[in-house]
Image (cartoon, rainbow, N blue to C red):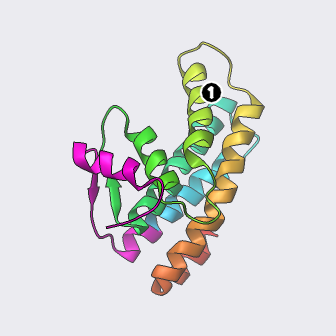
Amino acid sequence: MMEGPLWHRIQALLDTGEVERGEFGGAELAGLFFKARRADRDARNGSLYIDSRSTLAYQALHQYSDVLARLHGFRVKQGRRHHRNLFQVVHALQIDGAGNLDADAESAARGRTRSFYGLEATSETTVAGILALNERLRVVVRRELLARHPDQADVVDAAW
């Protein structure tokens, strides 16, 4: 059993079935990292429409977070709150360098939701905030992935 000040968050999600334990192969995780990195790069393309960039940036944030959760043996099931649950799991894992992903990603999600429903225009500030989170997570995911699956270095380095 894991320990730590935030373990109860993960345990509560495990108890409700919103999160499950699992083992995930290095190739699967490296492939997801590759996809996240591609979305992250595309989101930085200033010639794309800002709403597209916002969607791509958030997709990358979610995928980077998913790799981190799976590296630690957790899969967040799809459902109404799966994005929030994923960010809570990653935050609760207290991974060095990941920061307070729960609060940071929640802020990004709020901005994305407001623009998605037409309540406000997507701003460069919102996209820049998500991209900054991605930059932080990209470094952490690469480090964690190579530490656990050094055999995937070619895929990870190609995505880098």
Q: Residues within 10 Å of mark 1 (few under 14, many from 20)?
A: many
Name the quarter where the C terminus is drawn. bottom right
**Up-down relation of residue 139 to residue 40 (above or below):** below
Image quadrant where one finds the N terminus: bottom left
Q: Which residue is mark 1?
A: 111
User: As drawn, is 76 to the left or to the right of 40?
Assistant: left
SS label for mark 1: helix
Q: Is residue 38 above or below residue 155?
A: above
Residue that sits furthest to the bottom in the current view: 151
Say if 103 sits above or below 32 in the image.
above
Residue appearing at x 43%, y 40% in the figure: 83
Tell me which segment is drawn in magenta.
1-30
18 or 31: nearer the viewer:
18
Q: Residue 47's spot in the image, x, y percent?
A: 75, 39
Asked if the stretch drawn in magenta spans residue 19, the answer is yes
Amino acid bearing label 1:
Gly
- Relative horizontal placement of residue 46, taking residue 25 as reference (left or right): right
Location of residue 91 in the rendering, given as x and y in whole percent from the top left corner: 52, 52
